[in-house]
Image (tube, helix red, strand yellow):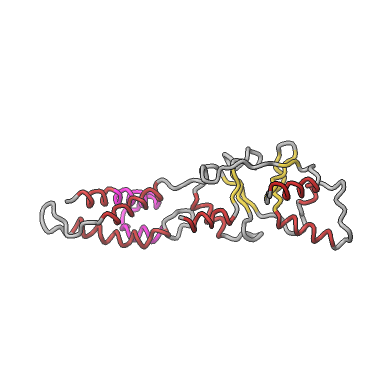
Amino acid sequence: MGQQAESFLISFNRIEKWLRQKLGNPRNMGFSEMVRHLSRRKDLPVRSHSEDLLQMAQLRNAIVHDQVAEGFVIAEPNQWTVDRIQQIENELLEPEKVLPRFKKHVTGFEISMPITEILKTIAAKKHSQFPLYSKGKFEGLITLRALGYWFARESLKGEIKLEGRTARELIISDGKKTNYRFVSADTTIAEIETLFHSDGDDGMLEAILITQDADPNGNLLGIIRPRDIYTQSEKS
């Protein structure tokens, strides 16, 4: 058996063991059936690799069961196939986490901050998300969409006067609220993609905030917008 076949089988066997563990070590379930079952799991990156894995299962069978002589296999994987299965192995067994890719400094704002200061910050720094806190306690997230809705609603009352008005008023309890989620630092990219693709009761997520343990009152380690994850996916 050639070196490429050996390398292929090593990765294949590791993937098979991982699939079996994810399914609770079933006794009577073959590789292809396990792939099909786990492809339904939205929290695992199996679906995007399922077609390749099913094809590779046929190649594995040819290598293991169709040897024409001792040490000689009828199907020797090419380098692309070996590289591909090793890539899949890495993405399944060691999936990428939200950090460090989305690690960034995120500025928090006091809920007592004047709305005029928020508008100045938008103009000067082009911020689009404003995590609001009250003495370290997370109170809510304001986005440009929520800000626009607030201005539209206020305009119906007449002239909008901003003097003396604070960010607290931007957290709308009876209208368009910002839809966000907190996740921990060890959340996988696959889980983030699932969250953005799954519409909740309040519609599609506008932002995902990262803290060490998904604690809203913890230090913000990063923030992910839908366009961040989709842009990254298009580049990869």
Q: Residue furthest top?
A: 135
Relative height, residue 127 to residue 49 (above, below): above
Q: Is residue 140 magenta?
A: no
Q: What segment carries the magenta color? A: 11-38
Instruction: Provide the major secondary structure of the magenta segment.
Output: helix
Residue drawn 69% across the image and 49% down it: 141
- Image quarter in which the C terminus is found: bottom left
Q: Position of residue 198 (x, y in %)?
A: 57, 60
Q: Position of residue 223 (x, y in %)?
A: 60, 47
Residue drawn 17% across the image and 60% down it: 74
Residue drawn 20% across the image and 55% down it: 64
Frontmost residue, 226 versus 41: 226
Q: How many marks?
A: 0
Q: Is residue 157 left or right of residue 134?
A: right
Relative height, residue 189 to residue 217 (above, below): below
Q: Is residue 211 left or right of residue 78?
A: right
Residue drawn 31% across the image and 58% down it: 30
Q: Position of residue 45 (x, y in %)?
A: 44, 54
Frontmost residue, 36 versus 159: 159
